[in-house]
Image (cartoon, grey):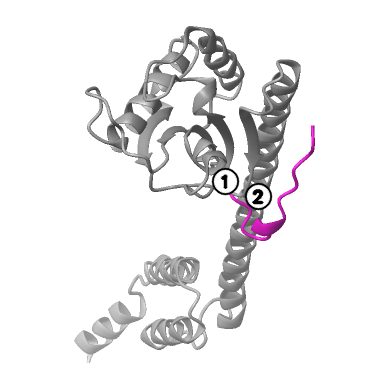
């Protein structure tokens, strides 16, 4: 009997104080897992299932925090992210609109400078400019630059190329294409085998004079030959063939308005 009494007294005085911090630790771990999961997922159903699984495992009922409040927090974070993305998208769209507007202003300003130069020097019969949805187009008749059947730029015409280059250097952010065109009359000299060669040489030689300007970025320039295959008028008349023999300088747009490409305003000089 005495041995049994001593054994009972030993059981009654067993130290169980370690259970309290252990329970607190498990509760904190449960809360941590729930918070981490809520922060990384916005699926309410999955979160509820996860929370219930933790609750059952630790016999804590619905857990330390209500599931609904945690799901709301996750949804709030998602809404904030969506709002931020919407604001970023609006900002990017506004920036693009501003770039489109600036580009339009640049090209209108350049067109005005060119037109003023044409009027001042009496070149309206040889040069014209046109601003459309893709480019600012400068058209120069072959008579203003070359002798018949030749690709050598006239000495007196070089100042025209220099003047155009001086204006182009003010707008360095645009790609520029120099294109050569001829009429459909076969070339008949030993220098060129066809109108392809003639139009190619004319484009390249005029472009080379533009590129003498050291402030122009050569990487933005290219030359192309169309021969007789891009006429702007009939080749059946002398006047039509004269219009078809030309050099075109295209200042290409970087941006095109997606909302209203048919109604880009152009200011008259």
- Give the residues drawn in magenta, as a range: 255-269
Disc 1 on helix, strand or loop? loop
> Which image quarter is the N terminus in?
bottom left
Q: Residue at x 35, y 70 (%)?
A: 15
Tell me the quarter of the picture where residue 135 sits: top right
Magenta stretch contains residue 268: yes
Nearest the viewer among 224 and 218 is 224
On screen, residue 102 above or below 85: above
* Nearer the camera: disc 2 or disc 1: 1
Front residue of 8 and 159 = 159
Q: Quadrant of the C terminus?
A: top right
The answer to whether residue 169 is above or below residue 140 is: above
- Give the left or right position of residue 125, taking residue 62 as reference: right
Residue located beneath label 1 in the image: 255
Residue 216 image position (x, y, % from top left) = 48, 17
Residue 91: assigned label = 2
The mark that comes first in sequence, 2 or 1, is 2
Which residue is painted at 61% across and 53% down in the image?
Answer: 88
Q: Position of residue 19 (x, y in %)?
A: 38, 72
The kind of secondary structure the magenta stretch mainly shows is loop
């Amino acid at each position: 009997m005495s041995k049994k009494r001593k054994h009972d007294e030993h059981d009654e005085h067993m130290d169980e104080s370690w259970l309290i911090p252990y329970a607190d630790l498990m509760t904190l771990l449960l809360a941590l897992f729930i918070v981490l999961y809520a922060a990384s997922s916005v699926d309410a159903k999955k979160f509820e299932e996860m929370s219930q699984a933790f609750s059952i495992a630790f016999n804590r009922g619905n857990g330390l925090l209500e599931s609904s409040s945690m799901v709301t927090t996750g949804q709030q974070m998602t809404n904030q992210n969506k709002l931020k993305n919407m604001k970023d998208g609006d900002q990017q769209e506004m920036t693009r609109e501003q770039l489109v507007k600036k580009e339009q202003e640049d090209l209108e300003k350049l067109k005005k400078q060119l037109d003023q130069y044409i009027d001042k020097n009496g070149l309206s019969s040889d040069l014209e400019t046109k601003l459309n949805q893709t480019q600012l187009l400068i058209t120069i008749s072959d008579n203003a630059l070359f002798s018949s059947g030749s690709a050598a730029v006239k000495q007196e015409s070089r100042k025209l190329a220099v003047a155009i280059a001086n204006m182009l250097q003010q707008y360095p952010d645009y790609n520029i294409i120099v294109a050569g065109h001829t009429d459909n009359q076969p070339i008949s000299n030993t220098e060129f085998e066809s109108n392809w060669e003639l139009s190619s040489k004319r484009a390249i030689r005029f472009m080379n004079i533009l590129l003498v300007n050291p402030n122009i970025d050569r990487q933005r320039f290219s030359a192309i030959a169309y021969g007789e295959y891009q006429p702007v008028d009939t080749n059946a008349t002398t006047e039509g063939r004269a219009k078809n023999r030309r050099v075109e300088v295209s200042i290409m747009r970087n941006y095109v308005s997606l909302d209203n490409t048919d109604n880009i305003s152009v200011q008259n000089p």
